[in-house]
Image (cartoon, rainbow, N blue to C red):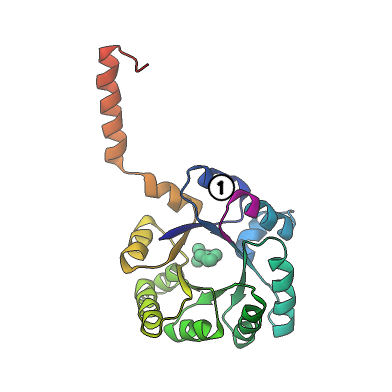
Amino acid sequence: MEIFIDTANIDEIRKANDWGVIDGVTTNPSLVAKEKGKDFKTIVKEICEIVHGDVSAEVVATDYEGMLHEARVLAKVHKNVVVKIPLTPDGLKAVKALAKEGVRANVTLCFSANQALLAAKAGAYIISPFVGRLDDIGQDGVQLVEEILQIYDNYEFKTKVLFASVRHPDHVKQAALIGADIATCPFKVIEQLYRHPMSDSGLKQFLDDWAKLGQQIK
Ligand code: E4P
């Protein structure tokens, strides 16, 4: 499973990328808005120079022509840009037209299996079901991802399934268990993936015992 980082913060991206586990990046308008005062295209370009994988950048137009225009502008920033398009009738129409031009689309804000079916038929490169946001309203986000994986498998759709809106490390484990192609995680969750109290206490014990020896490894 690929692990993406879900942020537009350059420091977080640089740090997680240095750890060697990041395969790509997802951003959205809310995440970009947190990086006050920075030009959007400059942020996207900078991210693409740090992480050598897919980088999702979202359009903000809501009409077909506007989305096409913004998608083409964003796709020109770097060859790794995947344009994020919202799941609406105009959005999927734009996805279809962009696919013909070779522009890859990540269809975002997916909350149902039928929406995911339509996105795949339109030629989406990635579908992003928002698991955490469904969990937040008492629906089963993981089950949605399972349904999408089953439907895509039934009809051999090539669209990648991206487990989005990750809230905690257990979401990442669930994504891997059910076979999602990608999980996109906030920086905090990526950090948490490394952590186990027994790893920390075990290491401390090893180092304390070693210190008593007074030896060095040379
Ligand atoms: C996905 O690409 C989105 O940016 C993201 O996962 C949304 O998550 P949120 O529900 O934490 O905003």
Question: Is 77 placed above or below 120 here?
Answer: above
Query: Horizontal placement of 52 versus 207: left or right?
Result: right
Which residue is nearer to you in this view: 38 or 78?
Answer: 78
Q: Residue at x 37, y 65 (%)?
A: 175
SS at badge 1: helix
Q: Which quadrant of the rendered structure holds the N terminus? A: bottom left
Q: Nearer the viewer, residue 15 or 109?
A: 15
User: For the C terminus, which image quadrant?
Assistant: top left
- Residue 59 is inside the magenta segment: no
The residue under label 1 is 12
In the displayed structure, 59 sits above or below 79; it is below
Q: Position of residue 109 (x, y in %)?
A: 53, 75
Residue occupying image coordinates x 58% and y 45%: 14
Which quadrant of the view contains residue 99? Answer: bottom right
Q: How many marks?
A: 1
Please tell me which residue lies in front, 16 or 105. 105
Please state the horizontal and vertical placement of residue 147, each as a whole percent of the image.
Answer: 36, 80
The verdict on residue 51 being magenta is: yes
Left or right of 32, for residue 25: left
Q: Toward which corner of the image does residue 173 lie, by quadrant?
A: bottom left
Q: Point out the stretch of residues depicted in magenta.
A: 48-54
Q: Could you tell me residue 39's position as x and y percent?
A: 75, 57
